[in-house]
Amino acid sequence: MSTTDRLRYVYAVTRPFEGVLPEGAHGIGGEPPRLLRHGDLVAVTGAVPPEDFDEAPLRARLEDLDWLADTARAHDAVIAALSTVTCPIPLRLATVCRDDSGVRRLLEEGHDRFARALERLDGRVEWGVKVYAEPGAAEEAEPQTPTSGTSGRDYLRRRLHARRSRDGDWQRADALCRRLHGELSRYAEAGTVHRPQDARLSGAPGVNVLNAAYLVDRTRSEEFVELVEAASEPGVRVELTGPWAPYSFAGIADEEVPASTPEVPAPAPEAAASAPEAAAPAPEAAASAPEVPAPQEAGR
């Protein structure tokens, strides 16, 4: 199949830049991405087969979790390579145009929004912070039935003690989440709180009670990292990821949200069974199966 018969997958939008992408940067299907310039913007694209990415087959493909994970990995590989040479706006997974003319229309129609976002994102990176409440030994040892030789009163006392210990874990996790979010927001230019990740997908121990992303100036990243690494509380684990391209802030030109605005949800045991986060493909999406938006219609 010739390139002209294939669709255009758009990974990101950036400003024109000198140099080339790192050698070995490959996207979907193992093909190197191509730069398409239109005015003062550049679209980073790749040719993809219509039997996978045209509207009808794409809907079916999005139900295939293995295919989805592979596509997310390839998408992120291009964004990561691009981030080493310029500041990109990562586009949503499965942003597809019919041809180069469709890509140019995408850039032209979204020009002002892209330009504002690039201005806000230039020189900034995304850091991810997750807080997990980990079951204490008391919770694991909570007796379910009286054992031989144990009085009913002792059995009830042990259960009450275990439940109080578990409640204490949740209260500590809640307090740390709120304190940490407030402190990190002072270092970040913007922040957002995602839905807690489903432990069945992430495989991480404990219950995810905070899943946040912060947009941080590169020059302040060292201070930001030190602040996260210093956070500690018995029965609570803090995980830092990044720096990433600003996936969570690609729409920052549409919504000017200060870092302190998002409310940190109170942790609850039910969080372990919540639905997976629905967002633009974050870097860790390659290891899970994120819910993704419908493909863009630009240029179809």
Image (cartoon, rainbow, N blue to C red):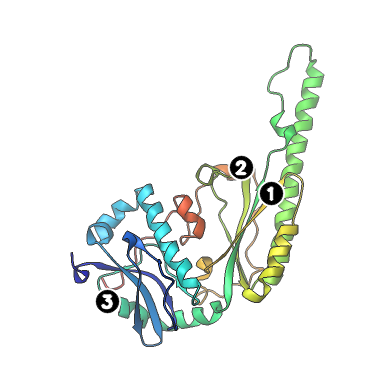
Name the residue rendered at 48%, 55% in the picture: 285
- Residue 57 image offset from top left, x and y in percent: 25, 55
Q: Give the labeled residue for mark 3.
A: 100
> Which quadrant of the figure has residue 36?
bottom left
Q: Give the labeled residue for mark 1.
A: 237
Specify which label sits upstream in the sequence, 3 or 2: 3
Specify which label sits upstream in the sequence, 1 or 3: 3
In this orientation, does residue 247 appear? yes
- Residue 14 image offset from top left, x and y in percent: 44, 78
Image marks 1 and 3: residues in contact by CB distance under 8 Å: no
**Kind of element beneath mark 2:** loop
Name the residue rendered at 41%, 58% in the picture: 72
Q: Is residue 215 above or below residue 159?
A: below
Q: Is residue 174 left or right of residue 44?
A: right
Name the residue rendered at 58%, 74% in the picture: 124
Label 2 neighbourhood size at 10 Å, few (<14), some (14-19), many (20+)?
A: few
Label 3 neighbourhood size at 10 Å, few (<14), some (14-19), many (20+)?
A: some
**Kind of element beneath mark 1:** strand
Image marks 1 and 2: residues in contact by CB distance under 8 Å: yes
In this orientation, does residue 182 appear? no
Specify which label sits upstream in the sequence, 1 or 2: 2
Image marks 3 and 2: residues in contact by CB distance under 8 Å: no
- Residue 133 image offset from top left, x and y in percent: 67, 45
Q: Give the labeled residue for mark 2.
A: 205
- Residue 242 image offset from top left, x and y in percent: 58, 62
**Kind of element beneath mark 3:** helix
Q: How far is the residue under mark 1 from the one under mark 3? A: 47 Å
Q: Is residue 38 above or below residue 11?
A: below
